[in-house]
Amino acid sequence: MSQVAKNLNNVVFVLDLSQPVSLALISENIKSFVSRGVPIRFGVVPLVSPLGQEDAVETQLAQLLWYLTDVAGRGPAMSFLASLQKAANGKRVTPELARRKYEQLAARMPPMDGGELASYDEVQTGVGRHKASASHSRLNRARQYLRRLGVQLAGAQDVVEGESSAPVGSFFMNGAYFPLDDVSLDLTLLNTQRTS
């Protein structure tokens, strides 16, 4: 593509962050496009569980991602997702794995303005320091946005230990809806590998 002063295309991914394919899409594919300066503006809307199911792993991961992005920036947030993907080893992320990886990242992070990162529990309950409560208002906004788009909330599908029949997600390119299925993911991965 030619150099362009503006991002001409917008792509918004709606992804279940507990799925290893979703983590790979963010930490490898999207990161590759951004690092090469491809004129596409990317957004990620995590699939979250319905109200009252805040302990679902998808919702916990969404809150962690929002918190890390707000407090530490995109780099540490992407690093967190990449470490989750590697540790999950092709299986669905569990709450225990998410907690362990977050606590490892928090232990390595240097103190920021206002001190250390909030604890895992502070991020999940929305109390405590460093914008931990901001992720709770985002949960409600994410649910409203997903309903408005007609996207089914996470947790509506049956999940077997370590596996999920849940769809990976979908994406909107300049407003047009596309489901993310095995065929579109294979094409995305193939195109990224060709251009790398």
Image (cartoon, rainbow, N blue to C red):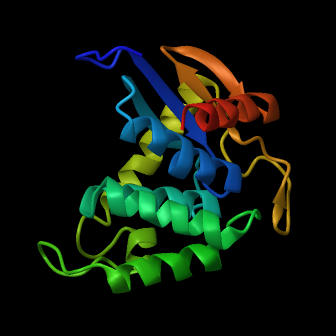
Say which of 146 and 10 sits in front: 10
| Above or below: residue 94 compared with residue 38 | below
Q: Residue 40 falls in which quadrant of the image?
A: top left
In x, y percent, where is residue 159?
A: 83, 58
- Percent x, y of residue 64: 44, 64
Above or below: residue 87 compared with residue 158: below
Work out whether residue 49 can be spotted. Answer: no
Percent x, y for residue 99?
54, 78
Q: Is residue 89 left or right of residue 104?
A: right
Q: How many labels sit on residues?
A: 0
Q: Which residue appears at 45% of the width and 83% of the height?
A: 104
Q: Residue furthest left?
A: 113
Name the side, left or right, on which 158 lies relative to 48. Answer: right
Q: Nearer the viewer, residue 49 or 160?
A: 160
Please say whether residue 85 is visible from this viewpoint.
yes
Q: Is residue 7 left or right of residue 16?
A: left
Q: Give the residue at x 59% y 35%.
A: 192
Q: Which x, y percent locates residue 123? A: 39, 70
The C terminus is located in which quarter? top right
Quarter holding the N terminus?
top left
Which is nearer the eye, 88 or 33? 33
User: Residue 132's image quarter?
Assistant: bottom left
